[in-house]
Amino acid sequence: MSPRQPFVGGNWKMNTDRRSSVHLARAVGDGLPDDASGVQCAIFPPSIHLNAVSETLRETGGGADCVLGAQNFYPEPEGAFTGEISISQLRDLGVGAALVGHSERRHVIGEPEELIARKTTAALESGLLCVLCVGETLEQRESSKTDAVNEAQIRSALEHASASLLDGIIIAYEPVWAIGTGRTASPADAQSAHERIRALLGRMYDASVAESTRIIYGGSVKSANAAELFSQPDIDGGLIGGASLDADEFLAICSAARPRQELQGASS
Ligand code: PEP
């Protein structure tokens, strides 16, 4: 029996306006069961809608179990950082989680490893749940570099993170070629990458960190493929992009992540 609570996050990216973000947050908050069935859910709206979504989640019933997440922040407490948002400003709005190292920030915005490491440490030290995204490009996959890329990105991001901070980390394995493309890693390939990431955590820290750290999969997950992916022993949920913009789809994916023993009970 896995001690790890499944996690499903919805990354809305640069989508929604104020009205549709409130509508989507209400549908997710109202649709989550009171106890969220053992799954920890989170939504990551655009920063500009965090306040509106925070208020909406507070008004909804199941929203109490839905963590509000930020897609981005700057790892300094305050000061002359035009256009940036600090962790304490996010906390003030009720934010409890943040994405770090998402492939669009690495490869489209050009965020360097050194900044990703600073953000990871700052998020963990502040007590935010830090969803650290890693994964290989298609070219790296085709030259059999998947595990090496994951290892390099994780070692770099966690360079300053001691074992005592790792309660707050969730690692999202997101092959770049699968994000937003409709192509998904096969459950066996995703499981193999997750298993190696868990073994890496064992080498970097210890067996207890490896066993307790949640490792989730991202890359074109939808309700039709979620259950098979989440049934793999080292896949502890998912980070969902496109499909999280549809409340029914997102809720179905959250429910596919229910703890393994519950699913077994429901089907027997
Ligand atoms: C993501 O944005 O992290 C993601 C996995 O996107 P999609 O589900 O659309 O592939």
Image (cartoon, rainbow, N blue to C red):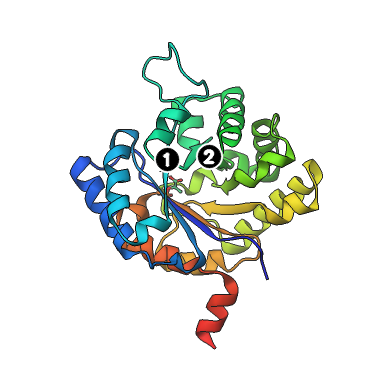
Residue at image location 42% in from the left, 40% down from the top: 95
Q: Residues within 10 Å of mark 2 (few under 14, many from 20)?
A: many
Left or right: 14 in relation to 22? right
Residue that sits furthest to the bottom in the current view: 268
Q: Residues at badges 2 and 1 in contact (C-beta under 8 Å)? A: yes
Q: Quadrant of residue 15?
A: top left
Residue 214 placed where, x, y %? 62, 53
| Nearer to us in this view, 267 or 52 | 52
What type is the residue that disc 2 sits on? Leu
Q: Quadrant of residue 72?
A: top left
Residue at image location 77% in from the left, 53% down from the top: 208
Left or right: 241 in relation to 121? left
Residue that carries the numbered disc 1 in the rendered image: 95
| Nearer to us in this view, 31 or 186 | 31
Left or right: 118 in relation to 244? right
Question: Marks 2 and 1, how far apart in space?
Answer: 8 Å
Residue 40 placed where, x, y %? 49, 58
Left or right: 68 in relation to 18? right
Beta carbon of the mark 2 residue lies under 8 A of ligand 1: no
What type is the residue that disc 1 sits on? Val
Look at the picture and state if 62 lies above or below 139: below
Identify the secondary structure beneath mark 2. Answer: loop
How many numbered circles does the render carry? 2
Beta carbon of the mark 1 residue lies under 8 A of ligand 1: no
Residue 166 placed where, x, y %? 67, 43
Residue that sits furthest to the top in the current view: 80
**Quarter of the figure that contains the C terminus:** bottom right
Which label belongs to residue 128? Answer: 2
**Quarter of the figure that contains the N terminus:** bottom right
Look at the picture and state if 136 lies above or below 226: above
Residue at image location 55% in from the left, 76% down from the top: 262
